[in-house]
Image: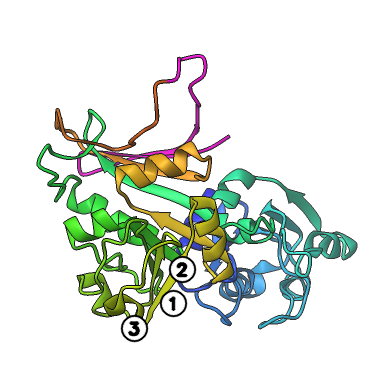
Amino acid sequence: MAGACLLARHGLGQVHPNPLVGAVVLRGEEWIGRGWHAELGAPHAEVMALAEAGERARGATLVVTLEPCAHHGRTPPCVDAIIAAGIARVVIGAEDPNPVARGGAERLRAAGIAVETGLLADQVRRQNFRFFHAHRSTGMPWVTVKLAVSLDGRIADAAGAARWLSSAESREWVHRVRAEYAAIGAGAATVIADDARLTVRGSITPRVPPTRVVFDRSGRLTGGEGIFHDAADVPVIVIRNSQLAPTPGLETREGVTVLHADTLEAALRQLAAHGVDALLVEGGGRLAGALWREGLIDRVHQVVAPLWLGDGVPAWAGLGAPSIVDARRWTLTEARVADGDAILTLERP
């Protein structure tokens, strides 16, 4: 199943609103077929794996990260292909949360196929956080905060300089993470200070580039910042306080939408109404701290660089000083090393 999850990542940025799915056909311990959902409308992972296995699939085991679909969508039901291939046993990671598509496990059992569910289900759900969140109907986007920090918890030095705190390998990883989201956000101060463009670069080109979101409560943006130069191609949403007067150079730019909200929760609800179902926030420390204080964060990626910055800019501003007893403990779901950096992924329990 872990191998099927790795295969599923080949579809990163290409299959939304469908989930990432990987599949392996096994005969004993031999992989005789493998597949993944590569792009929207293309054959699903199970069909791809069965095609590679060919006649050897008869009597074999199919391992698939998500419950096979049982409905006609852009492609025929995967359960029909599994039954026709003569698969004897199916091992499923997580059940499908989509009421339209679910029911595959029951269909397979009714056809006499042995079915097991729940293997590495949490890992599958984390990989498809956006897909599972979409079926929770919260009216809010999934929110992830990504910060690159020093060992002493700083995101910039005392002068405010932050480039480049993390390694080249970590920065490439960040671009792969960006490809998973509907939008990438930052505070206006970060956009201005870093000339942040909030785009996906590197080895992955998403089918739909993430919208850029700038939280500009105090009205610092003029419309001349670099992030707006390609707004006609990759849209930008600016969120401002409702009491601010319009900024002509901003309001009239092609590809720029200005929303007004006086709280972060209201801002996130407006983003959800504009189709943003998953938001990656990349700074700065005041925005990250405000999101945390209001309980609006679902996941944190913290890239820890092996250096100290002393009296630099704190990564999480304004958190207060709770006692150890009252401190919020999050769940560490992944830890990796990237060219000397430690990348920690945590989710709220």
**Amino acid type, callout 3:** Thr
Whether residue 88 appears in this view of the structure is: yes
Q: Which quadrant of the structure image shows residue 175?
A: bottom left
Q: Which residue position holds label 2?
A: 259
Q: Nearer the viewer, residue 89 or 339?
A: 339
Q: Which residue position holds label 1?
A: 208
**Residues under labels 3 and 2: Cα distance?**
13 Å
The answer to whether the residue labelled 1 contacts the one labelled 2, judged by CB atoms less than 8 Å apart, is no
Residue density around tag 1, few if under 14, some if 14–19, many if 20 or more, within 10 Å: some
Residue density around tag 3, few if under 14, some if 14–19, many if 20 or more, within 10 Å: few
Q: Position of residue 303 (x, y in %)?
A: 30, 42
**Residues under labels 3 and 1: Cα distance?**
24 Å
Q: Position of residue 176 (x, y in %)?
A: 35, 60
Quadrant (top left, top right, bottom left, bottom right) of the C terminus: top right
* Marker count (numbered): 3
Q: Position of residue 242 (x, y in %)?
A: 46, 62
As drawn, 310 above or below 294: above
Magenta stretch bounds = 322-349
Q: Secondary structure at mark 1?
A: loop
Residue drawn at x 18%, y 57% is 194
Q: Which residue position holds label 3?
A: 252
In magenta stretch: residue 324: yes
Side (left or right) of 28 relative to 145: right
Q: Which quadrant of the structure image shows residue 107?
A: bottom right
